[in-house]
Image: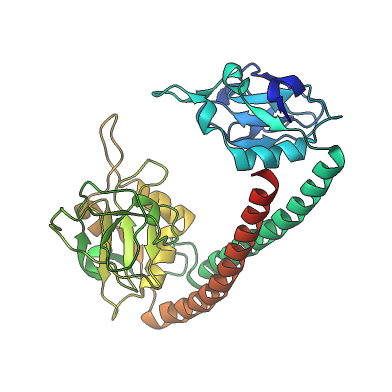
Amino acid sequence: MKVKLTDICRPKQWKIISMNQLLNDGYPVYGANGKIGYYSEHNHEKPVLLIGCRGSCGSLHITEPFSYANGNAMALDDLDDSKYLLKYLYYFFSNRGFVDVISGSSQPQITRTGLERVVLPVVPLKKQKQIVQILDTANNLRQKREEQLALLDDYLKSVFIEIFGDPIFNYKKWPLVELNSIIENIDSGWSPVCVDNHRESQDVPVVLKLGAVTYCVFNQLKYKIIPKDVDIKKRVEVQSKDLLFTRKNTKDLVGASVYVFKCERNLLLPDTIFRLNYKNTLVNGIYLWKLFTEKGFRKVIQNLATGSAGSMPNISKEKLKKLRMPLPSLNIQNKFASIVEQAQQIKQKMRASLDEMDNHFNALMQRYFE
């Protein structure tokens, strides 16, 4: 037995509060991407489930009490809580998704009309409570592990500043050098038309996507497969200890870098990612990676990017080579790198544990909702 979503609630888009109307305090404002700021008024006294209906279509958020639901998210108002729990619906839709109700090609959106096609199984409240309790427990474990990983990253940031100081002000008076003086050269790859699939073995050559580097942690699963009938024109294969750098991306993401601790075979660079072949007698690649990802210095790097209207910002090799930076002694760099490598081993174990938790959580979702 099933029931229509619109029979248990009233999906509604409220008036949009623009970014320049947001305040530093007041009632929290929620949009398609979660909490975005504060406002002087609220339109919901109780928590409400929001579905992103513009931009981040299908994203899900539960608001705090006394919040403002912004117009780029659909609020499931007047939910009949005698039939459905808010948190149960959150988990149900997290598993279900909204691919079948998203309309519009140039500007995807979710409308009330689309949501009228959505149906839910009829589940007794007692059973819903049991499901929510089990999923909450599994989800909380995942969140705690993610928090531990974040704390470890924060620790390494504080160690960097403690050892080297702020790289922008360089209070410790380290010598300033141009990047060109501590690298041999900069490699770039090749971007053929590829297939967005997973490969069956490491014998299949693939080209990395920007997402492999974008968030400053190497993700070797972000790749595209080179079709068998395409000749590989330029083979720049990623190796362990490589320092990779995104020369082209959005304004906020350009200039990301990663240090490759280990990687699979046959991962090739696209032309949007540089490999900085640093001189290991002068600089440790881990130090460079952490320097490039330090918040203030990252902005300096991003300011090197140029681009015309309508195109993504780009950092040229010539500008990157002239980048000036503090260069501590190699001995001090190596000591810092040792700390990072020890932390990396801990993070690997934590991530493996998190992967297991994710698999367990997803299995539970499939068990209860499919």
Q: Considering the image in quadrants, where does the C terminus appear?
A: top right
Q: What residue sits 26% from the left and 37% below the top?
A: 307
Front residue of this view, candidates 172 and 297: 297
Q: Position of residue 345 (x, y in %)?
A: 53, 76
Quick check: 165 left or right of 306? Answer: right
Q: What residue sits 60% from the left and 67% below the top?
A: 152
Front residue of this view, candidates 134 and 23: 134
The single residue placed furthest to the front in the displayed view is 1
Q: What residue sits 81% from the left and 29% below the top?
A: 46
Q: Position of residue 67 (x, y in %)?
A: 74, 29
Q: Position of residue 226 (x, y in %)?
A: 24, 54
Q: Considering the image in quadrants, where does the N terminus appear?
A: top right
Q: What residue sits 61% from the left and 68% below the top?
A: 353
Front residue of this view, candidates 30 and 154: 30
Q: Position of residue 34 (x, y in %)?
A: 63, 36
Report if residue 213 is visible in the image: no
